[in-house]
Image (spheres, rainbow, N blue to C red):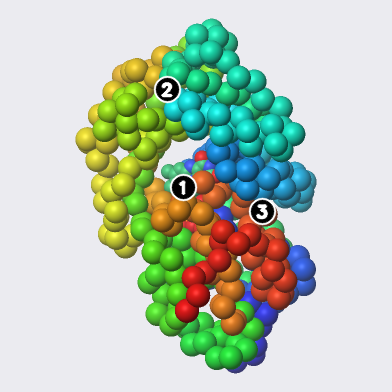
Amino acid sequence: MSRIDAVVVGAGAMGAATAWHLARRGRSVVLLEKFSRGHVRGSSHGATRIFRVAYRDPLYSRLAGRAIPMWRELEETAGEVLLEQTGQLDHGEPVAIDEIESALRGGGWAYERLSSAAAHERWPSLAFDREVIYSPDGGRVFADRTVEALTRLAQSEGAEVYFETPATALRVADASVTVETPAGAWEAQTVVVAAGAWLTRLPGLDVPLPETRATAQQPVHFPIRPGYSFPSYVHHVGTDAIGHTFAYGAYGLESPGEGVKLGLDTEEEVDPDLQTGISAEALADAVDYAERWLPGADTSQVSAVRCLFTMTPDSHFILDRRGPVVVCSPCSGHGFKFAPLIGSLAADLVEGRDHGTSAWRLPAA
Ligand SMILES: Cc1cc2nc3c(=O)[nH]c(=O)nc-3n(C[C@H](O)[C@H](O)[C@H](O)COP(=O)(O)OP(=O)(O)OC[C@H]3O[C@@H](n4cnc5c(N)ncnc54)[C@H](O)[C@@H]3O)c2cc1C
């Protein structure tokens, strides 16, 4: 068994980005994925994700800003468009909109505050709740295409990629780690565990982790009514505005070829190995929501997909190193927009450099 620089466990957005960065830095890398190429059982599938610099927490505005040139570099290398800054709106809870305004102002980003009536006049596809802020730098990223591009580019830089090859256990020594799979074992200086909702299920991953929960999400798509178009939107829903059904929030965007996407955050905790079917109740909630808030959506037709969030208690990411183990779990429902940046930060950790943020540390043992 020859020793390589790194094994990356999980070929979702984060694992594929990490493998790409490591391979282009000349590191020997194996990327392991337990399911098939392009599978739809984790968090990274689907055509699009929202890209936004408009965050309540200025940390994530800054990081989104750092991610933009990395998206452009990835696009140039891949030869395809992966980030479109088509604009993004936040509306709803006044405290949330005020905090976003403060983060955008502090970061020197362009923005516009509008009344809900003025916003509806400009974007008639949406109805607006209380306060509105528009950020022209937001938009969308193309998710499936990004994962495929990162994987392809990692391979072209020399990474070995194995699909349908689960890591079944880690054996961690002081300065190396052995990663076992049904196809054999690899000894590496470092392992990067980017296993999404399966993070806590890898035998031998003996590092203290914050509590994480895998929740099932069911975004839906509606056809867009003729003459309408949608910016990316996030609705900061207060329980006072709509009631308990949509207590967490709603988001969506125009997803070319799919229609307008709508996600309503849910708390349905699931076993990631037990894939559940479409929930008729969640589908009905989505139609109810769209009839109230998405006048540009044709609610006579709806299609749904399932997707997993890996939630930490504070919605921060996990990106930290213990000995030869790097844990890379940037989800909590908002990680995709940072993928090229996260891959670079995870590769830095593999190489012994730490430029991460204190919010993402593993707890002390
Ligand atoms: C419905 C939905 C909407 C979202 N919307 C947005 C958005 O608008 N904007 C945004 O920025 N982000 C969004 N996100 C979040 C974003 O998609 C995630 O942050 C990101 O996809 C997480 O990627 P990941 O690589 O960590 O996880 P995953 O994509 O789940 O990848 C983990 C991979 O590890 C593999 N794996 C697990 N265990 C093993 C093992 N033992 N051996 C080998 N392989 C293993 C899994 O099969 C999986 O492929 C959304 C997520 C969902 C679900």
Q: From the image, tell me which residue sits under label 1.
A: 333
The kind of residue on which mark 1 rests is Gly
Please determine whether, in this image, residue 225 is positioned above or below residue 170: above
Lower sequence index among marks 1 and 3: 1
The residue under the point 64% across, 84% down is 189
Seen from the viewer's position, the closer of residues 99 and 64 is: 99
User: Split into 4 quadrants, where in the image is the N terminus?
Assistant: bottom right
Estimate the spatial distance between the alpha carbons at disc 1 and disc 3, rounded to whole Å.
Answer: 16 Å
Mark nearer the viewer, 2 or 1:
1
Task: Indicate the secondary structure of the residue bearing disc 3.
Answer: helix
Res 223 label = 2
Mark nearer the viewer, 3 or 2:
3
Seen from the viewer's position, the closer of residues 21 and 147 is: 21
Question: Is residue 38 visible to us here?
Answer: no
Lower sequence index among marks 3 and 2: 2
Estimate the spatial distance between the alpha carbons at disc 3 and disc 2, rounded to whole Å.
Answer: 31 Å
The residue under the point 32% across, 35% down is 247
